[in-house]
Image: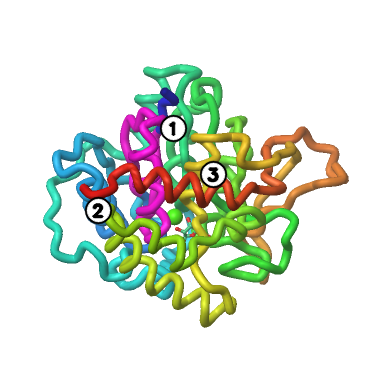
Amino acid sequence: MEKVILDVDTGIDDALAILLAAESKQLDILGVTAVNGNVPIDTVVTNTKKVLQLFDNMNTIPVYKGAHQPILRSTHYAFHVHGEDGLGGALQDMEVAKNEDMYAPDFIIEQARKHKGELTLIMVGPLTNLALAVQKEPRLSDWVKKVVVMGGLVSEGGKGNTLPTSEFNIYADAEAAKMVFHSGLRIQLVSLDVTLKAFLTKERIEQLKGTKYYEFVMQSTEIYREMARKKFDLEGCALHDPLTVGVVIDPTLVETETYYVDVETKGEISYGQTVCDFRNLLGKEPNVEICLDVDHKRFIDLFIETLRVNENK
Ligand code: BDR
Ligand code: CA
């Protein structure tokens, strides 16, 4: 089984990503690290613990609290997408146990040292925790097998979700993303170019009826689907973070190529843009494997089938 750490800013689609990872039974989840992002860090920790408890009441997957703010900029939350509580009002009454004491970037370093060449990091929030880890331990780039990042957009310029050029996770801490992209880590970028094709409709959610996840998925995604309807005239919600987990479970879901990608941190209207040098105009070494296309139908099938494992429970 692939050893992974999930770094999350839970978040509705983060929650669905956690459930997909845990239910797939194909990933050895060493821990989940929380980062400030969609909602403030303490809410992220609580939400993450709730979702893991929904998966397994005896939850044995540890949760580590990480960065409470971006490296340089002030915080930028996404309450309008995920609701004030980050879970669209779902699981409100669930009590949670305490999280682990270790700081998330230290946990990442510890596990990378322990499992050299074997650990995949699945990053579905702003990259602050990983930037802090790399700054503290530069050998991380030799130790970590791969980093799969949900973030940015490369060929669909103008179709960002935070600025026309920029995607939320990169925008929320572009300095951190820049540090990570220049760290020498092997990075795969699962960007909006493909995640916006991985759409979960209400009809597909109905297929979860009879499982313990039906109510949660239907309730939590309501505000998310409503936002997509109003803002983008789309029916359903994009599974950004679950697709990123899906790519680790089954890499053949996406077509990829490797290019030089950098992050804009100074632009007035393009802060957080991921700039891909398709024509190698800058003459730099390729550093990021980007996703050009996705078999979205096969991915949504995988998502639904994986969560249906719990039918009648
Ligand atoms: C990303 O931003 C967050 O709001 C989602 O959880 C996802 O990780 C999509 O741009
Ligand atoms: Ca996220």
x and y percentages locating residue 160 in the rendered image: 63, 66
Instruction: Name the one closer to the observer, 306 or 224.
Output: 306
What mark, if any, has residue 97 been given in the picture?
none
Residue tagged 1: 136
Q: Earlier in the sequence, mark 1 or mark 3?
A: 1
- Magenta-drawn segment: 5-34
Q: What residue is shown at x 35% (from left), y 32% (from top)?
A: 29
Q: Is residue 169 left or right of residue 205?
A: right
x and y percentages locating residue 296 in the rendered image: 60, 51
Residue 6 lies, with reference to residue 172, above or below; the image says: above
Which one is in front in this view, the residue at disc 2 or the one at disc 1?
A: 2
Residue tagged 3: 149
The residue lying furthest to the bottom in this view is 230
Number of marks: 3
x and y percentages locating residue 214 in the rendered image: 30, 59
Dot 2 falls on a residue whose secondary structure is loop
Which one is in front in this view, the residue at disc 1 or the one at disc 3?
A: 3
Instruction: Name the one closer to the observer, 274 or 206.
Output: 206
Alpha carbon of mark 2 to alpha carbon of mark 3: how far? 29 Å
| Dot 2 amino acid type | Lys
Residue 303 magenta-highlighted: no
User: Does residue 217 appear in the picture of this structure?
Assistant: yes
Q: Residues within 10 Å of mark 1 (few under 14, many from 20)?
A: few
| Dot 3 amino acid type | Val
> Is ligand 1 less than 8 Å from the beta carbon at label 2?
no
| Dot 1 amino acid type | Lys
Residue tagged 2: 212
